[in-house]
Image (spheres, rainbow, N blue to C red):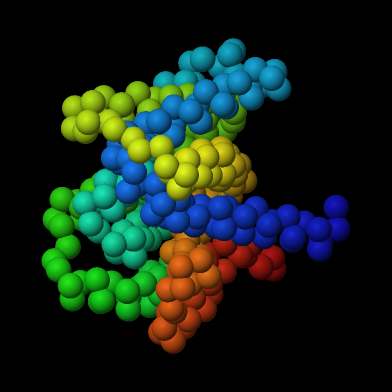
Amino acid sequence: MTGTTSRVQTLGGPAAFVLLWSTGFVGAKYGLPYAEPFTFLSLRLGVAAALLGVLAVALRSAGMAARPQYGRASIAGLLLHGGYLGGVFYGISLGVPAGVSAVIVSLQPVLTAVLAARVLGERPTARQWLGLALGVGGVALVVGPGIADAGSAEPLPVAGLVACLVALVSGTLGTVYQKRHGDRIPLVWGTAVQYAAAAAVLVVVAVATEDMSIRWTGEFVAAFVWLVLVLSIGAVLLLLLLLRRGTAAGVSSLYYLVPVATAVEAYLLFGERLSGLSLVGIGVTALGVALVVAPPRQR
């Protein structure tokens, strides 16, 4: 493999993940008006689990012999999908702006770096810590003007902010746990188990707190299909592959670019304008991520 091809593949995976993952906010914006958050998520994850199970059988994927690992897969699924997605969707449904939730969740790379240093023995360099700090600052610059406009209208719901903090903690713990145990969990079967576990818990929450009604409009169907196929299957499988190849802190730093990509998509799709400060933030965020994920120079 030539050096150029290797670099293209190395950059292509993270770039594809950021692009796919960022569309989740667009899908949520289209779908949540027609279904309550836990009902929406439990149905989405349940369908994704079934599709991945069928795919694993069709591909004769290894996994049935690794049943002892399915307990760990379930824990990772509850954290990565139940806690993270559930917190974000619930917070947005209560009125937290997407930009605010993005800023809260964007603290995940820093928490992941700290936790990974203690649990996994990953020691970020001074350059990587600088990149993590720049990432936080860049995201704040990108979404800051929108947050200021939203905050001037009415106070943010406390319950929604707490839900976003739950998403932040769950995503951090799930990323480190997946990095520690994920290499021994079969990819396709393991992801199906993750989704099934998260869907089972979210169904119980939906039954207890929601009426579970869904309006099957064209917008909801389009959002649902996109979130299941592109996000829950394509983007998540790519995330798990990236975690197997890279460090938890390095992969987690890609989340910095998600609000940036979402802001650009909102400009292209919905005409939401980007301020000059936001454009500066995009550059700062990209620089921060580059400092974190770039391999160290060999002496």
Task: Give the x, y percent position of residue 61.
Answer: 67, 21
Which residue, as the protein is rendered here, is positioned at the far bottom? 276
Residue sitting at 48 percent across and 81 percent down?
A: 279
Residue sitting at 44 percent across and 34 percent down?
A: 44
- Above or below: residue 42 compared with residue 128: above
Q: Where, quadrant-wise, is the C terminus in this rendering?
A: bottom right
The part of the image, by quadrant, that contains residue 210 is top left
Task: Give the x, y percent position of residue 29.
Answer: 39, 54
Q: Is residue 194 at all visible to an observer of this figure?
A: no
- Above or below: residue 144 compared with residue 218: below
Which residue, as the protein is rendered here, is positioned at the far front? 217
For this rendering, which residue is in front, 7 or 96?
Answer: 96
Left or right: where 87 falls relative to 253: left
Which residue, as the protein is rendered here, is positioned at the far right? 2
The part of the image, by quadrant, that contains residue 220 is top left
Task: Give the x, y percent position of residue 155.
Answer: 13, 66
Left or right: where 58 falls relative to 229: right
Left or right: where 288 falls relative to 54: left
So how many labels did they put on this image?
A: 0
Q: Is residue 261 at all visible to an observer of this figure?
A: yes
Task: Give the x, y percent position of residue 163.
Answer: 23, 48
Left or right: where 153 falls relative to 21: left
- Above or below: residue 248 compared with residue 204: below
Residue sitting at 44 percent across and 86 percent down?
A: 276
Residue sitting at 48 percent across and 28 percent down?
A: 47
For this rendering, which residue is in front, 167 or 181?
Answer: 167
For this rendering, which residue is in front, 264 or 240?
Answer: 264
- Above or below: residue 237 compared with residue 151: above
